[in-house]
Image (cartoon, coloured by chain):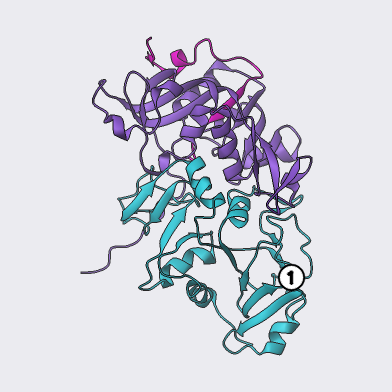
Amino acid sequence: MKKVYASAGEALDGVLRDGMTIAAGGFGLCGIPELLIAAIRDAGTRDLTVASNNAGVDDFGLGLLLQSRQIRKMISSYVGENAEFMRQYLSGELELEFNPQGTLAERMRAGGSGIPGFYTKTGVGTVIAEGKEVKSFDGQDYILERAIVADLSIVKAWKADDTGNLVFRKTARNFNPPAAMCGRICVAEVEEIVPRGSLDPDMIHLPGIYVHRIVQGPHEKRIEQRTTRKKEAA
Amino acid sequence: MAGWDRNQMAARAAEELQDGWYVNLGIGIPTLVANYVGDKDITLQSENGMLGMGPFPYEGEEDPDLINAGKQTITELSRTSYFDSATSFGMIRGGKIAAAILGAMEVAENGDLANWMIPGKLVKGMGGAMDLVAGVGRVIVVMDHTNKAGESKVLRECTLPLTGKGVVDRIITNLGVLDVVPGGLRIVETAQGVTEDELRNATQATIV
């Protein structure tokens, strides 16, 4: 089965519909599926629920879909870098479900692993626990968190082969594997599609079984906070 | 009343770390703790998926694929490993990280911690803080003892939404070091030039 598509728009053809739930990889602007996000903006799909750790910045990443009002609800752990997000949220135009970061990652991992929910002590005794089942194990309280199964996953990897085996680079891996796992359909954008057999099978980060469609970059890969140090004088 | 500055607080916090520990440092003063670990073998975790976090890169060597949890460009070390977010929080939730050092808006005498939200004002999100305080071996808060209005941040009860309930083990402020113990807080030490009375007067929480 052919998984490689010529453009992000073609890779999303036939899988987008209004009101769908999308899981997106990335942390801040690192490892985000920037091409697929832009293609969803161009497709104009509306009323989206998006599970993503962050919401991009105003003019890049998921911020693009906020600007165009295509997102109805975000499931995120931290949205501090996006002024437009804040404005829409405070004015009631956008729904927001805060998830602790580890809970969000595990909800995705569980969703892709056939586990409908899990107990965690994260958030016990906080607003996060409101309305959730509390269960005690060995004298410690845990809350029940439900898995996320998304209609569509969009992720970014470094390299892929044509069967969808993925390799990520450094901290750009972040939410991409769990986000990929939890989607009924997963579309991956990569910097390079390499010939079958050229990736070491022992070094595959995400097996191609989770990846249905692939498209190759180029990527902008924007840096959010450039921090450096000076070279000490010799 | 003199007390510690930011760097002295960070240096004091670094004394808490033991050789061989895997540690997560929060944003702000906790980040400075890395400058004071000395000869101890400490591995820093960045919860976006990295163990063995190195210093900031030299100018021109920034890599958009290599950032810390504060989204800053960083570098790797010879010991570095990378992993996904679910694995990262697995090691946090699983108690593999020995300690987290993080900032706070409020801490209460029962160990309650508030550091993620001011209703109606600050709505940024908790990030990984709730997972960290629930999962790591030891939670050490480093913060100013009072807010800009001069009011104590070390309280009988937190007024802001909690990050975690009964999670804080030790508090290091510009005025001294306090431990959460049954019945309230116990003074471990006072900062340079600060008397025990001055520390008590700046603290709303019960001191036992």
Chain in cyan, by letter, is: B
Residue A91 occupies quadrant: top right
**Vertical side of A97 occupied by B118: above or below:** below
- Provide residue A6's location: percent of width, then percent of height: 37, 14
Residue range of the region highlighted in magenta in the rendering? A1-29
Which quadrant does the C terminus of chain A fall into? bottom left
Residue that appears at 71% across and 33% down: A94
In reply to whether residue A22 is colored magenta, the answer given is: yes
Q: Is residue B164 left or right of residue B8?
A: right
Which quadrant does the N terminus of chain A fall into? top left
Three-letter code, disc 1? Glu
**Vertical side of B55 occupied by A167: above or below:** above
Give the colour of chain A: purple
In reply to whether residue A7 is colored magenta, the answer given is: yes
Residue that appears at 37% across and 27% down: A190
Look at the image and tell me whether residue A37 can be seen: no
> In this figure, which residue is indicated by the disc labeled 1?
B109
- Provide residue A135's location: percent of width, then percent of height: 73, 45
- Provide residue B106's location: percent of width, then percent of height: 70, 65
**Vertical side of B19 occupied by B135: above or below:** above
Count up the numbered dots: 1
Q: Chain of mark 1?
A: B
**Vertical side of A11 occupied by A68: above or below:** below
- Provide residue A76's location: percent of width, then percent of height: 62, 39
